[in-house]
Image: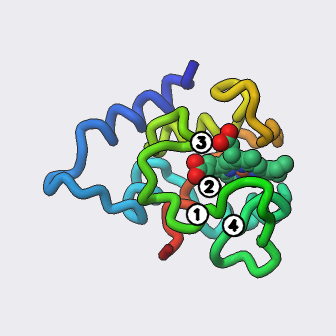
Amino acid sequence: MAAPRLQQFAAWYDAGPADGRPDWEEQSRLVLNGDPVAGRAVIDSHGCGTCHAIPGLPRANGSVGPSLAGLKDRSYIAGVLSNRPGELIDWLMDPPAFSPMTAMPDLGLTEAEARDAAAYLYAMDR
Ligand code: HEC
């Protein structure tokens, strides 16, 4: 299902960094080529904060979905996908494709928008 490009990201991640500990901020910039600053704007303009509490976005205090604080430390995305850059991008582009009963809608993010949003989510301090 993932686009070839996303499979490349996932493969890179699977190979792992030399010391075995992912540096998420580095990855979000270098692996995903995502821009956290642009991602913050994507998250803001798509109303993610109406459903999620999101650090760094003052008006993002929704409680429909889980808080996204500390997302980078979770093992799974929505309990169905491994928490890796390629999978996070896939999730953000079309959540119901991976979890048909989920309350999170497909918000129509392009791959570039999802990549930037993922970069922001992985770059958050907490
Ligand atoms: C209508 C409410 C709603 C909106 C809008 C929404 N989400 Fe969600 N989101 C949810 C719900 C509910 C879940 C839990 C999904 C599940 O477990 O099936 C979720 C799950 C997630 C997860 C996985 C969290 C985890 O801990 O596993 C991420 C990441 C996420 N959303 C990011 C976003 C982003 C980024 C946006 C904006 C582009 C967004 N969401 C917009 C409701 C929403």
Q: Residues within 10 Å of mark 2 (few under 14, many from 20)?
A: many
Is mark 1 in CB contact (under 8 Å) with mark 3? no
Ranked by sequence position, the earlier of labels 2 and 3 is 3
Residues at marks 1 and 2, CA–CA distance in whole angstroms: 6 Å
| Image x and y of residue 114, in percent | 66, 46
Q: Quadrant of residue 95?
A: top right
Q: Residue at x 40, y 31 (%)?
A: 8
Taking depth in this image into account, of 104 and 123 the one nearest to the observer is 104
Quadrant for the N terminus, please: top right
State the residue position of label 1: 120
Task: Specify the amino acid type for callout 4.
Answer: Arg
Measured Cα–Cα span from mark 1 to mark 4: 6 Å
Are the two marked residues, 1 and 4, in contact with CB atoms closer than 8 angstroms? yes
C-alpha gap between disc 2 and disc 3? 19 Å
Disc 4 on helix, strand or loop?
helix
Q: Which residue is mark 3?
A: 78
| Residue 116, numbered label | 2
Q: Secondary structure at mark 1?
A: helix
Q: CA distance from mark 1 to mark 3?
A: 18 Å
In the image, the residue with mark 3 has its CB under 8 Å from the nearest atom of ligand 1: yes
